[in-house]
Image: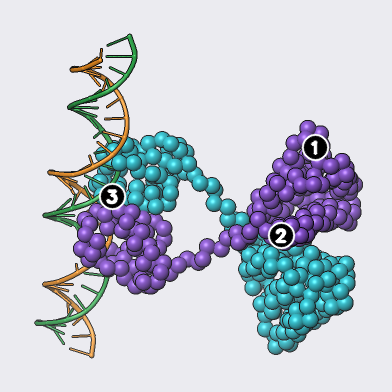
Chain colours: A purple, B cyan, C green, D orange
Amino acid sequence: MLRVSKILRQSIQSGEFKPGERLPSEAKLTQEYGVSRTVVREAIAALRSDGLVEARQGAGVFVLDAPQPEIMPFQNLNYERISSVIELLELRTGVEVEAAGLAALRHSPQQEEKIIDCHQQILACLERGEPTTAADFALHLAIADAANNPRFREFLSMIGSGVIPRAALQTGQDASSGDYIAKLHEEHGAIIDAISNGDEDGAREAMRRHLKGSQARYRAILRRSQQNI
Amino acid sequence: MLRVSKILRQSIQSGEFKPGERLPSEAKLTQEYGVSRTVVREAIAALRSDGLVEARQGAGVFVLDAPQPEIMPFQNLNYERISSVIELLELRTGVEVEAAGLAALRHSPQQEEKIIDCHQQILACLERGEPTTAADFALHLAIADAANNPRFREFLSMIGSGVIPRAALQTGQDASSGDYIAKLHEEHGAIIDAISNGDEDGAREAMRRHLKGSQARYRAILRRSQQNI
DNA sequence: GATTTCGAACATATCATACATGTTGCTAAA
DNA sequence: TTTAGCAACATGTATGATATGTTCGAAATC
C-alpha cells in the first residue's frame, strides 16, 4: 500500500497528474501496479486525507490544486549562521521595544510581579552558574504579556525558539564573566524600573539599549569567527 | 468512510485513545460502527497518512504521540473583529518603527528612489479616487526592504494580508475626505524625509506617529460600531 | 523450578468477487 | 433539435478467503 500511495503522491507533486485531471480508474491502477483493489483504494484514501485528490463517485478521482506552498515563515533560517540570529534580533528589537512601551502603560500588578519574579530567577541562575537562556526568555515573555496584547507573546513564541542559538555561543568568552553578569542585570533592571514607573519612553529606550547590547555581542562573535576562518 | 475516520480522529485528538495505546481491532470496529472491513481499513489508512497512528501487522494499530500542535502563528485571527486588526497594528508598529530607523541608516540610493516612487503612486491613486491599500502596503514594504534585513519584509508579508481589513472599513467616513488625504500624505512625507536624511530617530518617530494615527482611526471605528449595536 | 518450544488465537495485509450507486456520453425517440 | 433512456464505466461498500506477523500461555525440555 505504501508503495502505491508513494508513487501516486510523487506523480501528483511532480506534475505528472495536473490539478483538475482525473487519475486512472481503480481497475487501471490494479493492473498497472499488479495489486488488488483494496490496496489501490487504501492508497487513494491516504491521498484524500492529505487533501491531494478528491473522489467523486461515478466520475473518478481528481487532482486538487496544491492548497499553497504551506507558508511557514521564518522557517528558512540557518541558525548556524550568526548573521541569521542577528537578523532575527533586529526584528525582535522592534517588537520588544514596542512591548516594553505598552507594558509600561498597561501592566497589571500581577504582571509586574511576574516580571520582577523572572528577574530574580535570572539572578539565581547566574549565581548557581546555570545557563540563563530559559529564564531570560521567560522574562521577555512576561514583559510581552504585560503589553496586554496576545500577539506579542505569539510573535516571541514563534521566533523565540530560533532566537536562542547554539548554547555554545552563549557560553563564549564574555559569558559568566563578572562584567557580563553585572551589565545584563543592570540592563534588565532599567527596563523593569521604567515599566514599573509607567515610563513608556524610558521602557522603550531601556529595552532598545538591552537588545542593542545583545546584537553587539553577536556581532563581536561574528567578527571573531570570521577571523578564525 | 469519512464518518468513521472522522470519529476515530476525534477520539484520538480528544485523548480517548492515548499515545501508545492500541485501537480496537478491525473486527471490533466493523461491529461498532456497522460498516464493512473495507471502510474501516480505508479510515485507518487515512489516519496513517496523517501520522496519527501506526499499524503493525499482527499486533494492531497504535496511536502515535502528537508530533506537535502544528504551530501556525497568526492564523487564529478574526479579521472581522476590529480589535484583532488593532492588535496586529500594535505588533506591526514595533516592527515598522524599527524598520524605518534602520532604513534611515542603511538605505541605498535605489531603495530611496523606490520609496519615493511608492509615495507618488499613493498620491496618484488618491487623485484618481482609487483605493490606496495596495500602494500603501507597497510603500511600507519598500521601507522594510531599505532596512536591508530580509526578515522585515518576511514579517510584513506574513501578517500583511491580514492587516488590510475589509475594504469597507477603509472607505468609511474619513476616507477620501480632504483632511484624511492631506494627513496621510504628510505623515508619509515625514517618514520619507527622515529616511532620506539618514535621521534614525526622526524616522522612528515619524513612523510611530503614522501608525498611531492608523490605530486611532481603527479605534474610532471600533467605538462607532459598538455604539451601533 | 526455570527455560525453551510450540501452537492456538488473533491481528493486520492482501486478494477476489459481488452488488449498490452515481456519472457520462451516445443513441434513439419525440 | 431536443430529450429520454440506456449502456458503459466509475467509485462506494460488503463479504469471504488466504497470507503473514504477533502475542501469550501451555506443554515439553532441561
Quadrant location, the C terminus of chain B: bottom right
Q: CA distance from mark 3 to mark 1?
A: 59 Å
Q: CA distance from mark 2 to mark 1?
A: 32 Å
Q: Secondary structure at mark 2?
A: loop
Mark 3 belongs to chain: B
Q: Are marks 2 and 1 in contact (CB under 8 Å)?
A: no
Q: Within 10 Å of the Cα at label 1, are there few (<14), some (14-19), or many (20+) other Cα atoms?
A: some
Would you say residue A22 is visible in this rendering?
yes
Give me the C-alpha separation between circle 3 and circle 2.
61 Å
Mark 1: amino acid: Leu
Question: Do the residues under discs 3 and 2 have CB atoms within 8 angstroms?
Answer: no
| Comes first in the chain, label 2 or label 1 | 1
Determine contact: label 3, label 1, CB under 8 Å: no
Residue B164 drawn at (x, y percent): 66, 69
Residue bearing the label numbered 1: A126
User: Which corner quadrant of the image does residue A220 belong to?
Assistant: bottom right
Question: Front-most of B221 and B158?
Answer: B158
For discs 2 and 1, the disc positioned in front in the rendered view: 2
